[in-house]
Image (spheres, rainbow, N blue to C red):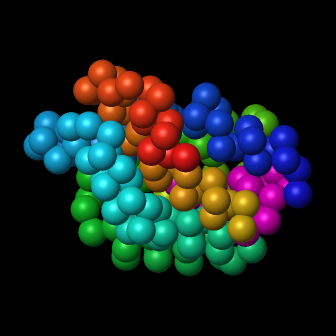
Amino acid sequence: MSLAALLVLADGRFPAGGHAHSGGAEAACKAGRIHDAATLEDFCRGRLHTAGLTAAALAAAAAAGLDPTVLDAEADARTPSPALRTAARRLGRQLLRAARATWPDPALEQLAAAFPRGAHQPVVLGVTARAAGLGPRDAAHVAAYESVGGPATATVRLLGLDPFEASGVLA
């Protein structure tokens, strides 16, 4: 395992587009479901145990070398909303672009050729993790962290939530 690769892949500044996606926090803030650190924690816990768990499983399976085409179809089946599928593919396309520049690997090129409009982000994350020398568990950890990191960061911007409180929720 490359600790450096793990840190780069999990860094919100890695140019993969995830920093610009609120993971549903924007709508939850507008609806009043997130309004402070306690409600952010509830939201993140729910997201971690639903979308985060699914993303972690898909990323781990892709990092283990399972067929990304099959995994992408599985991601489609688990993402009922067309808007969420579109967002997942857009994030996957952005991640793949950054990954190909950072960790050149034939598997990333094959994924780009198979999905010119983008594969689901967790699938791309798993293939990227493998290209970076990381294992399935590492890919799962990054996917799980991303599932709550984006919403926590978004609430700082959307609500003016104290960044120390948002970091406390993540910790």
User: Between 70 and 150, which is closer to the camera in this rendering?
Assistant: 150
For the point 28% across and 26% down, the residue is 158
Up/down of 39 relative to 143, above or below: above
Name which residue lies at 45% across and 49% down: 148
Quick check: can you spot residue 86? Answer: no
The one of 44 and 132 positioned closer to us in this rendering: 44
Q: Quadrant of residue 62?
A: bottom right
Q: Is the residue 36 above or below the residue 50 in the image? A: above
Prevalent SS, magenta region: helix
Viewer-nearest residue: 130 or 143: 143
In the image, residue 71 lies at what x, y percent?
A: 55, 74
Q: Position of residue 18 (x, y in %)?
A: 49, 39
Relative placement, left or right, of 142 versus 129 is: left
Q: Quadrant of the N terminus?
A: bottom right
The picture places residue 140, in percent across and down from the top left corner, at 63, 64
Give the magenta part as a residue range.
121-136
Query: Considering depth in this image, is 86 or 133 the residue closer to the camera?
Result: 133
Left or right: residue 40 versus residue 133 is left
How many labels, in total?
A: 0
Image height of 33 relative to 59, above or below: above
Can residue 156 be seen in this snapshot? Answer: yes
Q: Residue at x 50, y 36 (%)?
A: 167
Asked which quadrant contains residue 64, the reply is bottom right
Q: Is residue 167 above or below residue 159?
A: below
Is 83 left, or right, of 126 in this rendering? left
